[in-house]
Image: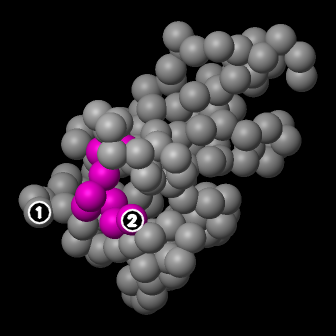
Amino acid sequence: MRLKLNTSNRIRATCTDCYFDFKVKSINGKYRTDSNSINKLMPLLVYPNGHNSRFNTSWREVDHVFIPVFMDKKSHWILVDLDMSNLHLDVYNSLFKTVRDAAILEAVEPLRLVIPHIICQSKVLNHEIPDAPLSIRLCKDIPHQTNG
């Protein structure tokens, strides 16, 4: 939160909580086949619109949204950076040697598919976004854990 509140930073950022990741995973796939798909996204719209009491910055006002993602199968956390200007996901994994890229991509796939719909429904961007999954970049040039 210090990054968000410090006005001397050159980037503007906010974050979500683990509930966001959990909810995206729970609706992934279901919203495309259900006629009430908009209703399934409604609980998530408080995040981009800044209506969540803990995450009260609209995605319209930031360059990056940091999303913690829990990898159930590996009992491991990764960090996803939603780049709002380029609309892609940068993924940071501190257990590079233990957790393989395929597992990372599997864990991030629900976000890649659902976030474009969340952005469209919340109307946080002033321009149209493609109705396509977001691209993903696995960031390798970061410090890695040696334990784990």
Total of numbered circles in the picture? 2
The verdict on residue 7 being magenta is: no
Taking the view exactly as shown, the residue that stands out farthest to the right is: 148
Q: How does the figure colour the protein chain or chains?
A: one colour
The verdict on residue 60 being magenta is: yes
Q: Tag 2, which secondary structure?
A: loop
Pick the residue in front: 85 or 132: 85
The x, y position of residue 142, in whole percent, is 58, 15
Res 87 seen here: no
> Please, what is the three-letter code of the amino acid marked with disc 1?
Asn
Pick the residue in front: 10 or 139: 10
The label nearer to you, 2 versus 1, is: 2
Question: Where does label 1 land, which residue?
Answer: 126
Kindly identify the residue that appears in the image at 50 percent across and 20 percent down: 139
The x, y position of residue 144, in whole percent, is 70, 14
In this rendering, is residue 39 above or below 7? below
Kindly identify the residue that appears in the image at 40 percent across and 58 percent down: 115
The x, y position of residue 13, in whole percent, is 39, 47
Q: Horizontally, is 119 left or right of 70 in the view?
A: left
In this rendering, is residue 86 above or below 62? above
> Please, what is the three-letter code of the amino acid marked with disc 2?
Thr
Q: Residues within 10 Å of mark 2 (few under 14, many from 20)?
A: some
Q: Where are the magenta residues, as a range? A: 57-65
Kindly identify the residue that appears in the image at 65 percent across and 66 percent down: 19
Q: Residues within 10 Å of mark 1 (few under 14, many from 20)?
A: few
In this rendering, is residue 128 above or below 81? below
Question: Where does label 2 land, which residue?
Answer: 57
Q: Horizontally, is 69 left or right of 8 in the view?
A: right
Q: Earlier in the sequence, mark 2 or mark 1?
A: 2
In this rendering, is residue 141 above or below 43? above
